[in-house]
Image (cartoon, helix red, strand yellow):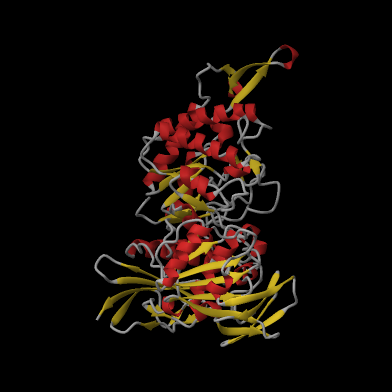
Amino acid sequence: MENTFVIGVNYWDSKSGTDMWKNWDPAAVEEDLAALEAFGVRCLRVFPNWRDFQPIRKQYEWGNHFRCYVFGSEETVLAPDADGLDPRMIEHFRDFARCAQRHGMTLLVSLVTGWMSGRMFVPPALEGKNAICDPEVLMWTDKYVRGLVRALKDLPNIVMWDLGNECNCMGEASRYQAYAWTALVRNAIRAEDQTRPIGSGMHSLSALDSDRWLLTDQSALCDFMTTHPYPSPTIRGDLEPYNGMRTTMLPTAQSEFYAGISGKPCMIQEQGTFSSTMGSRAMAADFLRINVLSAWANGLTGYLWWCGMEHLKLTQSPYCWSLMERQLGLVDADRKPKPVAFAMKHVSEWLERLPAFGSKETQAVVLLPRDGEKQSNATSCIMLAKQAGFNVRIRNSEQMPEDAPLYLIPSISGWAPLISNPWNRLLEKVAEGADVYVSFDGGSMTEFETVFGLESRGMVKNGPQHTAHFSFGDIEYRASFDMLVTSVGAEVLAVNEEGNPIFTRNRYGKGNVYFLGFPLERLVAAQPYAFRPERTQPYYRIYQEFAGGAIEQSLVRTANPYLGVTQSRQEDGSYLVAILNYGDAPAAYDGCLQPGWQAKALYGQEEVIGACDGLILHCTRK
């Protein structure tokens, strides 16, 4: 897992979906996997249904008092030390793993599959209980995980254990309860298998201390972070069509945010399109293709589509509960491929031929303030920087800043957005020659005159719509707080229609401090088409105003904001450069190569880069 980019799908069989284990049909599975193998699937994320694998029930005696646990429909009384696992389900899974191995597929096993597609699947004895906090459930969870790992760990094609499937949906929990549950499952896995990495399997984790399921807690206990970035409101991917700029970039940006805050590798573990009303089959193919290429070129460890098979004709819950998540397979119900299957085959075959991309180079560090919408601010920074022509890595502002030529502190808000020691160390780095950019959202700061070269004349809350006059043109904005400022040494780079300085640069030692008087990152995160300049405004041009040195470090530069460039140095001193078109229309390639270098295309066409596609160059010195 550490050095290999995995590509594949999440899998429930085509015949029974979530009931595949209790309705085990090896012939159907064999046909499913043959169909998936033909279209480039090399890895499966699979789900032992907790209800079926540990089918324990309760029996009661007089006064409705609990008497004993029994096993399944046979009602065999369980011994006190029994784990309650069904040996038939274990054998079904082993048969499945052998079938997957015949088709050249590795497995990611989501152990605690107690939640799936909107429905709970827990053992009958545990129904109605909080699956994260209830002590009885926790006892059986520990028995279940230890028993299942013990029974399956000899299977050679299992490459990762997941805690489960989106287990933060299984019950309300405090941060401490969430940590304790995660530790229990992690420790149960490690008690039986110390060799394989453990993935989080969660979605919608947070970097805010006030939330419950935290990235930092998951990373303390797991080896891999996972994102499930559908075109959904959880990442504001529902603001625009999912094959266009923003929604094509957000999945990678969210994953980079997870990796940056957690310090652990991250993969796109689930991604699909929900339903056909959100877009066409051709759009789904575009969505998969650009997201696989983007994940590969931006340091993620893998990509899994949701899901392998279509479940349109299934009638049991959760499939009968809604008309969503029923048509998401690579293939139809009769196993005929959709356009998305051909896209999977195309990128899978190419990635097998290409060298490993390696770690991409970044030119700046984003330091996220303590308050504010951390994920939205982070993803906005990543996407605006990409459009401007450089790449960033994400960190918390509470951390001591690592060395970098450029730092970004986006949309600073609240009474205590920064703590003094890291801030003072950052100022030392600026004094030594680094640059820092700060955008303002009402946050409190000290030494404003000294650091920023500005004097505040007060603030106006929820002021009017403004127009800022930049060197490249006008930008409209409306801020929660307008700070009225006068320069006391700063160079004024832009003013608004009232003449108030809105973008400034102040010399601080050998470096520069840039100040933007409105929360650009927070505003664009919530604005439809914010990353499509022909539909709104060229917000990314603001980043180009302060990041010239970072942009110049790229071997390949482009003026097209729909083309994102990443580069990675290879062991022999050459570079792989990925130029990806995140837009929904073909883009003429206008790349400018640094003098003294030459390039050979390994993937794609140099003249025109297709919609949601890319160009991969191998660059060597002349």
- Residue in front for this viewpoint, 544 or 445: 445
Determine which quarter of the picture holds residue 459: bottom right
Residue 342 visible, this angle:
no
| Percent of width and height locating residue 215 | 53, 50
| Percent of width and height locating residue 556 | 39, 79
Residue 5 visible, this angle:
yes
- Residue in front for this viewpoint, 551 or 317: 551
| Percent of width and height locating residue 582 | 52, 72
The residue drawn where x is 40% and y is 71% is 432
Q: Total number of numbered labels?
A: 0
Residue 100 relative to residue 340: left or right: left
The residue drawn where x is 60% and y is 42% is 175
Rendered position, 62 above or below 8: above
- Residue in front for this viewpoint, 286 or 495: 495
Identify the image quadrant of the C terminus. Answer: bottom left
| Percent of width and height locating residue 546 | 50, 78
Residue 352 relative to residue 257: left or right: left
Rendered position, 391 above or below 501: above
Rendered position, 261 above or below 366: above
